[in-house]
Image (cartoon, coloured by chain):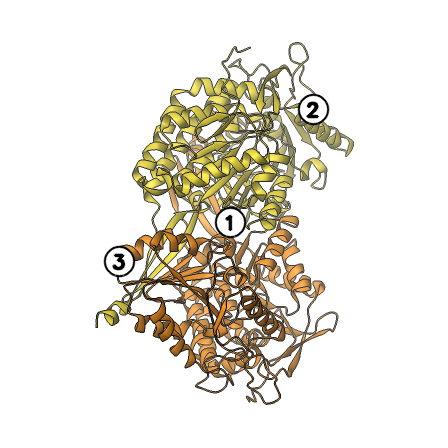
Amino acid sequence: MSKVQLPNTKLFINNEWVESVSGKKIKTYNPSNGKLICEVSEGSKEDVDIAVKAARNALENGEWSKMSSEDRGKLIMKLADLIDQHREHLSDLETLDNGKPLTAATNFDVIEAARSLRYFGGWADKIQGKTIPISSEFTSMTRHEPIGVVALVVAWNFPLLLLSWKLGPALAAGCTIVAKPSEFTPLTALYLCELIKEAGFPPGVINIVNGVGEVVGNALSHHMDIDKISFTGSTRVGRLIMEAASKSNLKPVTLELGGKSPNIIFGDCDVEYVANAAKNYVFANSSQLCCAASRFFVDERIFDVFLTIFTEKIKQLKVGDPYDNDTHLGPLVSKQQLDRVMGYIKKGKEEGATCHLGGEIHNHNVDGTGYYVQPTIFINVTDDMTICKEEIFGPVVVLLPFKTVDEVIQRANNTTYGLAAGIWTKDISLALNVSNRLKSGSVWVNDFNILKSQIPFGGFKQSGFGRDLSEYAIQSYLSVKAITIAHKTLHAQEQ
Amino acid sequence: MSKLQLPNTKLFINNEWVESISGNKFKTFNPVNEELICEVSEGDKADVDKAVIAARNAFENGVWGTTMTAEDRGKTILKLADLIQDHKEKLAQLETMDCGKSIVSAREDIDFCVRVIRYFGGWADKIQGKTIPISSEFTSITKHEPIGVVALIVAWNYPLMLLCWKLGPALAAGCTIIAKSSEFTPLTALYLCDLIKEAGFPPGVFNLVSGLGSTVGNALSHHLDIDKISFTGSTVTGRKIMEGAAKSNLKPVTLELGGKSPNIFFADCDIEHCVNAAKDYVFSNNSQNCCFSSRFFVHESIHDAFLTLFTEKIKQIKVGNPYDESNHLGPLVSKQQFDRVLGYIEKGKSEGAKCHLGGSKHHHADGKGYFVQPTIFTNVTDNMTICKEEIFGPVVVILPFKTVDEVIKRANNTTYGLAAGIWTKDISLALNVSNKLKAGSVWINNYDNCLPQVPFGGFKQSGIGRDLSEYAIQSYLSIKAVTISHKTLHAQQN
């Protein structure tokens, strides 16, 4: 077990560590053994107000508001460098708090956090407005201004990474920030605060208020002086945030919510290759992943052979101590999540699906602690079963045979979600025709879970709206101001 | 009074005129003489469901959503622009009858409709995605796809024009549409339906369900099979629409809401020129205009001269029969609006502002009609109701100021942020102030200059998203990122 040094656990406001007004604390636990890691200051509405004032002041009057876009970019890149330098420590903390394998925390979460920030650092001085052709008497232009004080509320599955995905474009745009990490995984965001200070961000640009969603999230979404809110998490909470925005100051909302993503494997595929690739992505992060490929549609002609090879590959996945280098799946994040996933597995069995592999709690520790679940494959599943319809957010996949292209498109789209989809085929026409017809924000052809800073990520339908990552993400943090200047009046005035 | 032939008054679904399921009707009145113009089929939730099914079918299975090229989509939109142009006079006459605006303004409205639809027709085959550089093993592209079935709900102040502002980008993007016009002004949208059919839009691409906000608007915003909703109207209703979206299928929302826009006159401006210009825009459409410059901030050194000249100019504005081309202002749209505006005028007086000009009902002919005098208030403080709330009628307040910082602070001291005007010869002052004003549109040495090419929409509680320009199209798109790994093909070939 790691002996990682814990970060400061207070609230981070105005580049200072402060106690919460109430003095209350939340507890955060180690999911690999269920033990308390530490207590963290718990923010409330009052703390949010203080943080918003700091952010507002930094936006309107502070050094940040006068800084050149070039210098803003340099600061963001500096933060990326610092994350790289502190990779080991950040990865350790992430694994401790979230339970994900240390190899994943290191090689994905923390590296990608730095890459994403560096990418957006490069955008800071390239957020160009337009000049608009009207006539010789008018000059019309748009300025892409920072929208103002923004709230960033993120989930516990990729604590540092999801925060970085939102910090990057918000900072590049010139916004100031009040962020709330998940109460299940507050530690890496706290650690990040020291790096933010060290990078040289002026006071008030980034503020972190830990706490529970019902209090801090609620205060942020209802706040009258927050200009925008961006959220990654559950559809249920996304609704509450949008409703609060509608009832307060009509702040624009970006939502990145759940999914029930189809992964379509056509008959011409190299089954061995596809199953091998699947092994690497299907249960990544224990499928606590909004774009998890949870519905495998496999051409009926290759279904049996795929199932055999896929099962073989999945059996090679090791569940266990997340600090162990050859572990693929650590524990789930929390007792709640474990119960939820086991509930879905039970439901799958009750509704008549065949639990082909796994389906039980994985007893890793002799004392039975830790929230481990076996990688689970269901077959004989019908599209209307609960496990085929609802997001499980755990290592449970269903395999569904299909006959025709039209049928599989219709079934793949038959969900309220639309986050991601996979297509596996050598046929370029088939690949592009199916990709056109899938209602999904990300479509991966002959790969899956390709998340890159340069590529937009976000949902169709009830998977949310707006995009994280890429140039598109920056749009959500801008106000477009159209300035139209009449020069004919100057002539008049000169006469 | 015009003896205009009225359009079909049924619901327009799947390119057909159909009765509302309930058979209910609502009445629309002429604001000039308060007389009934006609009854119009009143839609309800069940009619909305029918229209959504038509729009969904056109989107998923029809020619429009499947095989039509972007170029042909553009041509159909351009054809609609031509048809609106051909029917300009009839549309203008209908607009004046239903909404009360002067016939001259109504003609300007229709001209602008044509320009906007034509502008967006040109966009249809230019909505380009991106290719994204990753590495030699990946090809990553974005497709800017139509978001799907969209609901467009518009206000009564520019009935056809506001609809066209939304129709243009929604059609260019390839969406299918259920529109709801205001129950106060349903006629020009009804007339448009025949032009849509004539232009050759396939059935179900455009559907119009007239009716009330509390039924049709509510059904649209809560609908589980509408992918996006775009609204122009009051902040109160905008909130309800966003709440409806939050509680149903989380459809994205575009809102173009109210304003209390400042118009700032610095000491170096040519007063004569400014007031001449102001005469043309300040009370246009009876200031039933969301970007109306309702707060004039005038530098104290020119305040008195400005007020004198401005008053003189405003006195030249003629209120009366909107069909008379020499009249600038017709009646307000409705009894409700008339009462609301006079209520604000009373409030202004009772809170201690000085009613410098106007301030009463304008008595026209037989005393009928919702006419209000152009009204100027002076001796106003920033915390008075008439200086804070949107009046949506011909009432302007004149406020002196001393310093640049002061006027920026006061101009921004509002929950709204739709538009602002700046009048000065000083280029540094103009651009510095424009940077600091929290408003979606800033006009320098002009005002109310809405153009198809220039984005229009609000900061703060004036709304979310933009109408007009390339930016408007974004609201009607879903971004799909398609990433193709080619390394796998190599592996498969081995």
Q: Which mark is residue B435?
A: 1
What is the C-alpha distance between the residues marked 3 and 2? 71 Å
SS type, badge 1:
helix
Residue holding disc 2? B359
**Quarter residue B347 falls in:** top right
Q: Are marks 3 and 2 on the same chain?
A: no
Label 3: few (<14), some or many (≥20) within 10 Å? few
The quarter of the displayed image where residue B127 is located? top left
Element type at marker 2? loop
The answer to whether residue A68 is seen in the rendering is no
Q: Position of residue B73 (x, y in %)?
A: 34, 37
**Mark 2: amino acid:** Gly
- Amino acid type at circle 3 is Ile
Compare residues A277 and A3 and report the one nearer the observer: A277
Q: Residue furthest left?
A: B494
Residue B295 occupies quadrant: top right
- Residue sitting nearer the eye, A417 or B388: A417
Residue density around tag 1, few if under 14, some if 14–19, many if 20 or more, within 10 Å = some
- Quadrant that contains the C terminus of chain B: bottom left
Rendered position, A93 above or below A288: below
